[in-house]
Image (spheres, rainbow, N blue to C red):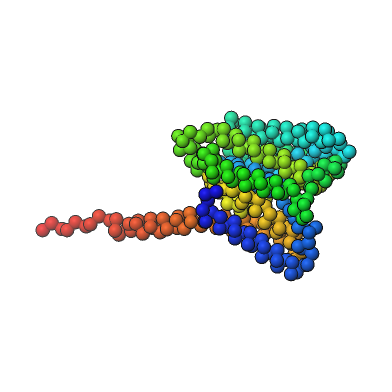
Amino acid sequence: MSRGFRGWMPLALMVALMVVIGAYTQTQESSFLSEFNLNGLFIAAIPLSLAAMGQTNALMVRAFDVSIGALITLAVVIASFTIPDLSSTGGVLLGMLAVIGVCLVVGVANVVLTQVLGLSSIIATLATYSVLTGVALWLRPTPGGSIDLAFGEFMLTSVGFMPVGFILVVVAAILGDLWLYRTGSGLLTRSVGLDETSAARLGARVRFVFVRALIISSVAAAVASFFLSAQVLVGDPNVGLAYTLTSIAAAVLGGASLAGGRGSFIGAVIGAVFLTEIVVIVPFLGLHSSWAQMLVGGLTLLALAFYQAPQIVRRIQAARRDAGATPTRADAAPPAREPVA
């Protein structure tokens, strides 16, 4: 994956920081690195990883899917109706297809709002977020409805401390990065995010790329909801709302640019695990839960500054050059005429 050393270095530093934080927490609480706790950490990271991958796909073409958290929430609520407790295998499959179908409908709605009506992706998906949140609350005003226990156990199957689902997510992320950086289609996708006009001249179907990004984001929300449903086993109308902001944060930590054209699915997964670790260590260190939110926000700002440092330095240098080249009022004044004798 031809991202170069500078592209992978921030991810390597983040992994190193995760190891250091984990080692320090282990010194404060010996149960942190237990098989049970590590399994719980990676299970919790699966839905966020999928949401972050979907968000990365959207950010790649300068689109924001603000609705993804509400869509995951609604999908969990729908699963509480379509995959009830004691469902047969066929019933579970039909219930999963129903959830995927609803998510696809939402994805199509976002496409219509952005590509047909011409609304910005932020405004369009923010409106969708509000609608989906209201529908979830209408269907389940309070948490209720038991999701099939066998379905939950299957989705959370683990080998040792590592969930099989997380392994599959990592494989999907690797394949995604191979596509993004080793294929012509991936190159055109990144070029659309950088410059739509130039990408169109290179043969990219710009509108199709935008449509694909929003649909993939909705499908990622559907798959994320299956793993989240397996964890909570109840239709909670608020369970996934936080993924809206944390999916963007994980994508940015993983190297996605808000200006489009740059990102990594592997980076998104690493960012998701990092943020999940931050949330998990807070109680182990005896800190108030508010620290988790502050640390997530601070780390996101730090990542933005780190990834955009070259551009920021160039802007400062350009501003200094412009200031140095601007003539002063005295320099700009015309020379005074000498009096005629």
In the image, is 5 to the left or to the right of 39? Answer: left
Q: Is residue 40 visible?
A: no
Image spot of residue 115 (x, y percent): 58, 32
* Residue at the bottom extreme, as displayed: 27
- From the top left corner, tell me how far across and down residue 213 is, in percent: 61, 38
Q: Residue at x 70, y 66 (%)?
A: 23
Of residues 281 and 137, which is closer to you in this image?
Answer: 281
Residue 280 visible in this rendered orientation of the protein:
yes
Q: Is residue 128 above or below residue 276?
A: above
Residue ranking furthest to the right: 86
Q: Position of residue 145 (x, y in %)?
A: 86, 40
Residue farthest to the front, as pictured: 159
The picture quadrant where one finds residue 338 is bottom left
Vertical comparison of 150 with 3: above or below: above
Q: Name the residue: 76% across, 62% down.
A: 33
Tell me what residue is drawn at x 76 percent, y 63 percent. Answer: 32
Name the residue at 59% across, 60% down: 13
Please state which of residues 269 and 322 is positioned toward the viewer in this rendering: 269
Q: Position of residue 282 (x, y in %)?
A: 74, 62
The quarter of the rendered structure image containing the C terminus is bottom left
Q: Quadrant of residue 129?
A: top right
Left or right relative to 237: residue 213: left
